[in-house]
Image (tube, rainbow, N blue to C red):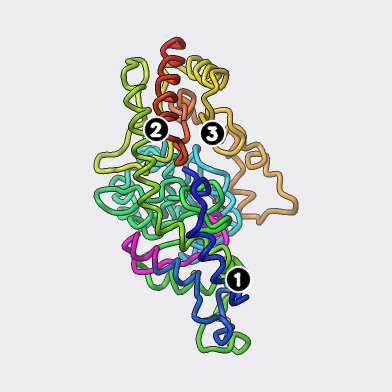
Amino acid sequence: MPGFELFGEAERNEVNKVLETGVLMRYGFDGMRQDQWKARELEAALQTRMQTEYAHVVSSGTAALTVALASAGVGAGDEVIMPTFTFVASFESIIALGAVPILVDVDDTLTLDPKAVEAAITPKTKVIMPVHMCGSMADLDALKAICQGHEILLLEDACQAIGGSYKGQPLGSIGDLGCFSFDYVKTITCGEGGALITNNQEYYENAHKYTDHGHDHIGHDRGAETHPFLGYNFRISELNAAVGCAQIQRLDEFLAIQKRNYTHVREALSKISEISFRRVPEGGEENYSFLNFFLPTEELAKKAHQALVEGGVDACFYWYDNNWHYYRKWEHLTNRKSLGKLPMELKNGLQHIGSVDFSASDHWVGRTISCLVKLGWSEEEVASRATNMAEILRKVV
Ligand SMILES: *Cc1c(COP(=O)(O)O)cnc(C)c1O
């Protein structure tokens, strides 16, 4: 997955263009900037690649999710459906607005189970937020159908699946809003950064204002701009955006490398009948950033993970026991450990969060192993990795 592996000349060149002008901010300073607008350039590239009307780049993926929700009018007490298997940023962005995260089971796609989503809908549900974890997507047709039946918005967290597609459309562009992260370990990186994309002009207009203290961005005098509503600062710097400008041009090159490496390892593991692979919804194409597979039992998955670690196979994860990606270890959320008082609506909404039964998620995540697909592996390294993994896993099952 990590684009940092191939950081090089193109990235340095883009950053140097910004350093030469000294204008590190995305707004203003028109006279000094010698026509360098890196955040804008990255937005234009995203619009083209993701086939959406609008893109807005921000300081992180978490910021992108927060801004996307805020731009769609999500606020205190609104419920947002999110999966049990994701990254903590999902609920962080929701609670930042005083909205209530509603955790819902995942299925064999390792993303939201549409049936469980349907069962979790209440009159307060405002958004369904599928998270396309580890390179592959949720069943977007099924989720869309649920949204349309209930006037609920679909917000795709495509932070881990940039470049993947569903029925020919780029992930992130299918819902009402889509978000990406360009943090240091993502498929393409800005160092830190993120983006939201949408075809909805109102959400876009809200987003660029909200990320910049409510600035209306009219005219050429920042100090004289007015503020139609309350905002915040989620701006990206031009230095970070410059890295992204180089990396997005290389996205398809990175995806091709990932696909080649992924396919090689998958073919080796396919010969082990006890191993099955994560289901990709019909019409979906992964971005190949991870290879995800199931062992027959939780016990065997734990053993397999241990054996891979001991056998020197790096970058394989057992998410079931992970502090950041699975609900079982989110005691700071379930115990509501905030530094200060939480908004009343949120406090009430979180009351029962620790006592929900997620055994349906455990059934899948407890048996899952995810292996990162790196860009920098040589052909020999991929080949020996595939053989090594297959040998180790065969012994375990
Ligand atoms: C990385 C990530 C985020 C957050 O992105 P940051 O840029 O690190 O804030 C959100 N959701 C998922 C699924 C992620 O993997």
172 in relation to 19, above or below: above
The image position of residue 38, as x and y in percent, is 50, 70
Q: Amino acid at mark 2?
A: Glu
Mark 3 → mark 1, Cα distance in angstroms: 52 Å
Q: Check if residue 58 falls in the magenta segment.
A: yes
Tell me the residue at 36%/15% (across/down).
274
Q: Is residue 103 above or below residue 176?
A: above
Question: Amino acid type of disc 1?
Answer: Leu
Label 3–label 2 contact, CB within 8 A: no
Q: Which class describes the residues within 10 Å of circle 3: few (<14), some (14-19), or many (20+)?
A: few
**Earlier residue among tags 2 and 1:** 1
Indicate whether 346 appears above or below 236: above
- Residue that badge 2 annotates: 379
Q: Is mark 3 within 8 Å of ligand 1?
A: no
In the rendered view, does 246 fall on the left or right side of 76?
left
In the rendered image, which quarter is residue 29 located in?
bottom right
Residue holding disc 1: 19
Q: Is residue 230 visible?
A: no
Residue at disc 3, secondary structure: loop
Tell me the number on the disc at residue 356.
Answer: 3
**Is residue 380 among what the camera can see?**
yes
- Residue at (30, 43) in percent of width and height: 285
Q: Which residues are magenta?
A: 45-65
